[in-house]
Image (tube, rainbow, N blue to C red):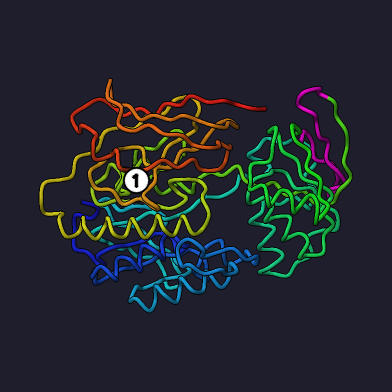
Amino acid sequence: MTSTGPVDTDVAIIGAGPAGLAAAIALRRAGVARVTVLEREAVAGGIPRHCHHAGYGIRDLHRFMTGPRYAQSYVARATAAGAQVLTSTMVTGWTADGGVHLTSPAGRRDLHASAVLLATGARERPRTARMVPGDRGAGVFTTGQLQQAAYLFGQSVGTRALVVGAEHVSYSAVMTLRHAGVDVIGMLTDRPHHHSYAAFALATRIALRVPLRTGTRVVEVQGRPRVTGVVVEDIATGHRRTIACDTVVFTGDWIPDHELARARGLTMDPGTRGPAVDAGAATDIDGLFATGNLCHPVETADVAALSGRAAGHSIARWLADRHRAGRQSGVPIEIDESFEWVHPQRASTLVDLPRNKIILRPRVFASAASIRVMQEDRCLWSGRVRHLVPTRPALIPTGWLARVDPAGKPVRIESALRTHD
């Protein structure tokens, strides 16, 4: 059990982004009486609060919304469902009996719950974590820092910007910079292709006239007290050149906000760097669950919300059945070298997954990929994925989970690829 003493709430959810709020709504609709959502920010809603472009809510709410409207909608739905949402409340650690330490403007206290759901999300690696040397002048951002500066605080972010990265969030950074009146002089990626939707890349290159340099990396940032330029290197030739700019935005390269998971002693997946979970969002500590981009960094907000909704269903069932014999830990799911990670990491008979899909994160660009799921000499499923693109999900169905032998050896996902540069 998560808490061994008297409980203050049935479920404590740490994180009030789309995943945490969607889980709270699902739990309340399933009849769970006391659901408490804990959010360290002053306003709930997560990252979409400061993403003013449209495109949110398509898969989960079946609406086309801006980020702030989407965030407000989830907060309103969770509150209307009867969940308690506590903002400016940081979880700083764990009690010896499985509760959580809270710090808020009201002071410090402990909270105990029958079940805890970690929905702490993910963050981009800043320039320092990427080990990019050079001067430490002003004007270096991650996408999240940029959006907060531009949208939440109305700050000037610069005049001439270079975007490092070419995934979904990189194109979001371009739109934020244009909103802020900044000239985007280019994007670059160390990979041979962009790894977003073709429509995004085409529109940015043709309509917005923002060029993309592939196979290129930043090797130095120059300028004090303000950035004056960056040195970039062609990976194939080693040729270097300096690009003049006063703003650099490092995008993507996500890492889960996993500090609480590690502090609790959860088994961590080396691929996602988040907690390892089964197909019902359960970790290896009974009563402790994890969901959203903490577990699959990162998918879009609506996929994170669908993950949270599925986790809510799973937790409601666990609460109803917790006095029975504990659930089996699940057979491990392994992957070959074509993939960085798989979600979930354990097969289980209880399946609550967003879109009823297993998520694979490719390492390489490939087309016409043949994939098969094996347990020893048994083929549980085989099929094809049209394209594999790094940082984008490859999805396979979940029906084969019912055919896994719970007493058997690990399941292995294998691929036969036709890669391209």
Q: Name which residue type carries label 1.
A: Arg
Give the residue at the far bottom of this rendering: 80
Residue found 56% across the figure and 73% down from its top: 69
Residue found 71% across the figure and 52% down from its top: 141
Using residue 170 as the reference point, say whether residue 119 is left or right of it.
left
Using residue 166 as the reference point, say whether residue 327 is left or right of it.
left
- Which residue is more in the foreground, 172 or 398? 398
Residue found 51% across the figure and 74% down from its top: 72
Residue 229 appears at what percent x and percent y?
86, 43
- Which residue is more in the foreground, 38 or 314? 314
Quadrant location of the C terminus in the rendered image: top right
- Which residue is more in the foreground, 67 or 46? 67
Residue 127 appears at what percent x and percent y?
68, 43
**Position above or below: 191 against 1:** above
**Position above or below: 392 against 332:** below
Residue 230 colored in magenta in the image = yes
Residue 215 appears at what percent x and percent y?
74, 31
**Position above or below: 92 against 191:** below
Residue 48 appears at what percent x and percent y?
56, 64
Residue 364 colored in magenta in the image = no
- Which residue is more in the foreground, 106 or 197? 197
| Residue 225 shows up from this direction | no
Using residue 196 as the reference point, say whether residue 99 is left or right of it.
left
| Residue 315 shows up from this direction | yes
Q: Which residue has dot 1 on it?
A: 264
Q: Tell me the quarter of the picture where residue 216 sits.
A: top right
Residue found 19% across the figure and 63% down from its top: 6
Disc count in the image?
1
The magenta-colored residue range is 217-238
**Position above or below: 5 against 413:** below
Give the residue at the far top of this rendering: 377
